[in-house]
Structures are given as structure tokens and as C-alpha cells.
Image (cartoon, rainbow, N blue to C red):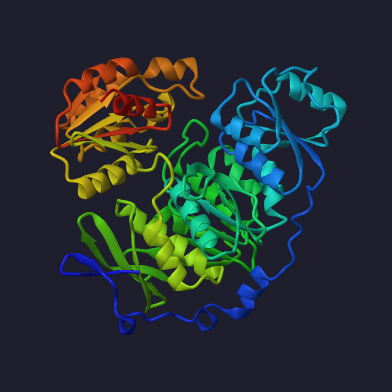
Amino acid sequence: MVSVTGGKLSKPSAEKLEIVDFQTDISGDDMQTATSRNVQDDQFRGHRVHFIGIGGSGMCGLAQMLTQMGAVVSGSDRRSTSATEKLSKMGVEITFHQSGESFPQDAQYVVHSAAVRPDHPELLEARKSGITIFKYAQMLGRVMRVKHGIAIAGTHGKSTTTSMVAYILSRAGIDPSYIIGASSRQLGGSAHGGTGEYFIAEACEFDRSFLNLHPRIAAVLNVEPDHLDYYRDIHDITAAFGQFMSQVAPDGVMITSSENPWCQEAAALAKARVESYGLSGTPDWLATDIQSAHGRLSYWVSYKGRKAAQLALRIPGRHNIGNSLVAAAIARHCHVSWDVIASAIESFTGADRRSQLLGDIRGITIVDDYAHHPTEIVSTLAGLRELYRPQRLICIFQPHQHSRTRSLLEEFAASFSSADIVVVPDIYVARDTEADIKAINAQVLVDRIVANGRCGRYIPTFPEVVTALKTELKQGDLVVSMGAGPVWEITHDLVHQL
């Protein structure tokens, strides 16, 4: 735990630290009800569960967790990956020949990812055999019901906040279960089947998949326009988040932003106690006295107007103040001490592809990030500039989906104000229709970036980007790859070639 004195980090005195006693500040009866019931974590022990698309994001984590809970897990996918290799080492039987003949007839449950088509041969065989079939999100919700569920939702920040909560509770010795949409080296991966009573899950709003979850503690970090290939508009999105909030256990707690109007609108549907958080005004959880020393942020947490503890961040970006504030609030509702919370947050290095430092080669700093929405781009670039203070900040942004690029074109074009140069390869195609692909291309985005006063360049392919940059980069440059697609390949290749 640290304080900032004269621009340097130093230990605070014991007199400065006031620890709030949550037995008096949070209703003991409410939290006793929310955390004292028995969990039935042996429900899947000995049951045969087969995963179709086992290497997919989330699927591999759920498969790992069920394996650790005693289930007999098998799976199939199109190709071998690091995720499937890890599962194989755990004893999971995986085939890369997907057909009706390869389907295990003794399976009791089948889980498939959203990417699996209805006519997939294994799925057809499962229906023919009368085996119980779950979508990934449905099985995730089923697992959550046998634990004390903690779910983190929102348009941005889910992976970082979920990772942080899992890390804090792990450091507290609680041994939680968790499934995160990003890997964390400090956690040893993206999933774990723990012996403790808590199950922490990243709750995704796409396809309304988070409506399969019924947590006892939940957070909605923000609500903004996104996934407009699925949702009609922001009102449709807000309604979905409102339904998610309404599913939090009535004796639990729902934490959401005091500064996001759509969060506040959705929170009106919650049956649980609602607590707000923010960096201004009078929310229940308030970050105050924010200070920065060489790009490292620290702040004081106040709960209901009383200072509780000071927290310092290792990860960059002011948006992570809010993420860490929520993680601290959730940890306190799990009765973790402030000393453990502060120590864990100060040592938390983040999730993979979240402002992840890949290397510093001859004074050229190379970073990778998952940002694929305008709000994320703005926050991440500002945080990187504040932390590294580069002479030039070069952003390689691969748009994710033609539909998203078209619906948020002007927001994307204005989001690179902290970058000196923006390089845009071809748009990553995901769930796009032919009409979506014809409607917009990367050059259109580059033209709008240039119109907003930035230096923008369209370079179609990854190899061409690497070739162009490696001859132009110089000491003092910061290069960051951004996007939900495989744009990380560019910066990894740059590290190798430089």
C-alpha cells in the first residue's frame, strides 16, 4: 500500500490509514445471507461432458474448470492450439476430426460454442442420441448456480476487472473458481476450478449470453453502443443490461457506474441492493485524491463518505481507477481485508493483451492491446502516453467487424487524438454479411482519421505493415497494436525482427 509524497511513492503512516469496518457499514444480515449457503460443487463429478469447439475463447476455460470439478471432459475442434494442448495435458481427450463417428456416445452433456453451426455433424449426432445440449453461456450459468456467483459485465473493462477480482481473492487464500475472457500470467491462465465458494465470471452481453447468469454479486462497469449487428440501438442494449441486473439475487449486491446514464437507467430494474461507484459526485464507492507519479496512479477509496484505504496501480490508464475501484468493492463484499486488497492491486500486472508490454528494443517500446471500441482506444492511448511519454506514439489498429466500423465510423475517426501515426490494415471479418463488407473498408476509416487531423495510413496486410514500420521506427517510439482480431501478430513479429 502506498501514498504519493513529493512525486515519489512512499509507504503511508499507520495513522493515515482508516479501515472501514464493513460489519457495520454493510448490513451483516444481507452479506451473511449472500455468502453462507452451502455450495454443491460436486454436481458434475463423474459426469461425461463433451465440448464442440473446445479451443474457443471461454470454452477452453469452462472445460478446464469442469475437469477440475471432477467431470470427465472430452472435446473437438478444427485445429490444435495452445489452449487445447493445455487441456490435453490435464487429461482431456480432444479430437480434431469432427464427425458423427467421432462423437462419444457415452456423453451425458454436450456444450457447444456460439460459433458452431446448427448442422455441425457432432451436434446433429447429439440431437439424434437425445443427449442434453447446452450453449456455452447456458452451461456457464448452470455452473454458477452451484457456487456463489460473481459476474462482471459492461461494454469495456470486463476482462481486466474480472482478472483483478480473481487475483485479489486468490491472494486472500480463498481459492475462487473463475472464467475470464483473457489470460493472465499471474493467474496461470484464464480459468480455474477452485475449492472456494466463489465463482467469478466475465459476463458478455453479445447474444444476450449474460442473461444465463444469476449471480449474487455483480457489476456493470458501463453501457455504450456496441454489437449493433445484434442489438437495435442503445435502448435495446440498456434493456438487456437491465434484465441482467434484475437477475442478481435479491439478497445480493449490484454495483454500477454513477457517471454512466445508461447504467443508472438499467439499475432501476435491479432487485438486489444497488451500490454506485465513480470518480466524482457522491457515489457509494468514490475514488478521491487521484495522483500520478511517472504515469503510476494512486487514489483513496471512500465508502459512503468515509475514507477507507489508499490504492496504487501498476497498470496504466485512468480508466483502470474505476476498474480497480469495482474490484476492491467486490472483494470487500467477499470480506477480504483492505491490506490484502491494496497489496494485490499494487502488484497486479494486468491481463494479456491489455496494455501488455511486449518488449523494449533499442529504445523502441512495443505494446499490444485488445481495444476495439472508440472509448477503449481513447482511454488506452491516453494511458500509454502518460506512462511511457514517447516521442512518437504509433498505433496499428485493425478494425474488428465491418458492421461495427460502419456504425461507429465517426467515433473511431475521432478516437486517435493521442496517437501521432495511425496504421490501419484490412478490417477483420467476424459475423459480417456480404452487404456489411461492401458497405465500408479500411481506407474509408483512414480518410476520416486524416480529416480529424491525424496522420493515417492504410497498409492492407500484416507483412506489409511490419516491413514498412521496421525501417521507419527510431529510438523514443512507442508502437501499440490494437484490435480484437489477430493484429497482435504484427507487434510480435516486430519484436522478433527488431
Q: Quadrant of the N terminus?
A: bottom left
In this rendering, the count of numbered labels is 0
Where residue 408 appears, as percent x and y from the top left, is: 35, 33
Whether 33 is drawn above or below 112: the answer is below
In the image, residue 338 above or below residue 188: below
Between 266 and 377, the residue placed more toward the observer is: 377
Between residues 171 and 303, which one lies in front from this camera angle?
A: 171
Q: Could you say which quadrant of the image residue 13 lies in?
A: bottom left
Tell me where residue 324 appears, x and y as whole percent. 40, 59
Does residue 441 appear in the picture of this structure? no
Q: Is residue 120 left or right of residue 372?
A: right
Q: Is residue 105 above or below residue 377?
A: above
Where's residue 328, x and y in %?
Answer: 45, 65
Q: Residue at the location (15% across, 69% down)?
A: 6
Q: Is residue 431 left or right of residue 196?
A: left
Kindly tell me whether residue 386 is visible in this rendering.
yes
Residue 295: where, in percent of width, then height?
Answer: 23, 54
Residue under the image location 30 percent in, 51 percent down: 316
Residue drawn 28% across and 19% down?
465
* Image side of residue 296 versus residue 209, left or right: left
Image quadrant containing the C terminus: top left
